Image (cartoon, helix red, strand yellow):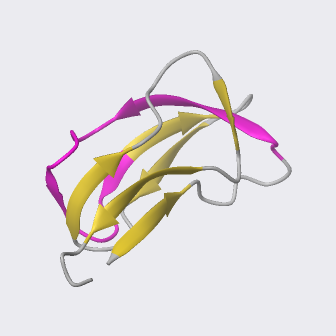
Amino acid sequence: MKHPIAIPNVGLVESVTVIEWTRQTGDAVRAGETVAIVETEKAQVDVPAPADGALEITVIPGPDLVSAESVLGFVDDGLG
């Protein structure tokens, strides 16, 4: 089953910038482990993995803003 990687609630912010991924596509991750870092106008925020499994990145880091409601990627737990 694929679990979406969502941006944690960052208040009334409408968009964020993906600063970096701490792992690569295909890497094994654990639930709660930081897999990405996003930046708002005021702070950098760690984005945790929603489950144990293999990371699938869909949004690349860069200067482009993404909606604060965007799915950044997925963690595939291999069960679905």
Residue reaching furthest to the right: 12
- State which quadrant residue 11 falls in: bottom right
In the image, residue 16 lies in the stretch drawn in magenta: yes
The quarter of the picture where residue 49 lies is bottom left
The quarter of the rendered structure image containing the C terminus is bottom left
Residue at 28 percent of width and 39 percent of height? 22
Q: Is residue 79 left or right of residue 63?
A: left
Classify the position of the N terminus by image quarter.
bottom left
| Vertical relation: 34 (above or below) 45 | below
Task: Residue 25 in the image: state x and y as whole percent.
Answer: 22, 43
Q: Residue at x 74, y 37 (%)?
A: 15
Rendering coords of residue 57 (x, y %): 35, 43
Segment tinted magenta in the rendering:
13-35
**Residue at (21, 39) in percent of width and height:** 24
- Which residue sits furthest top? 63
Residue 66 place in picture, x, y as percent: 66, 35
Residue 38 screen position, x and y as percent: 54, 37
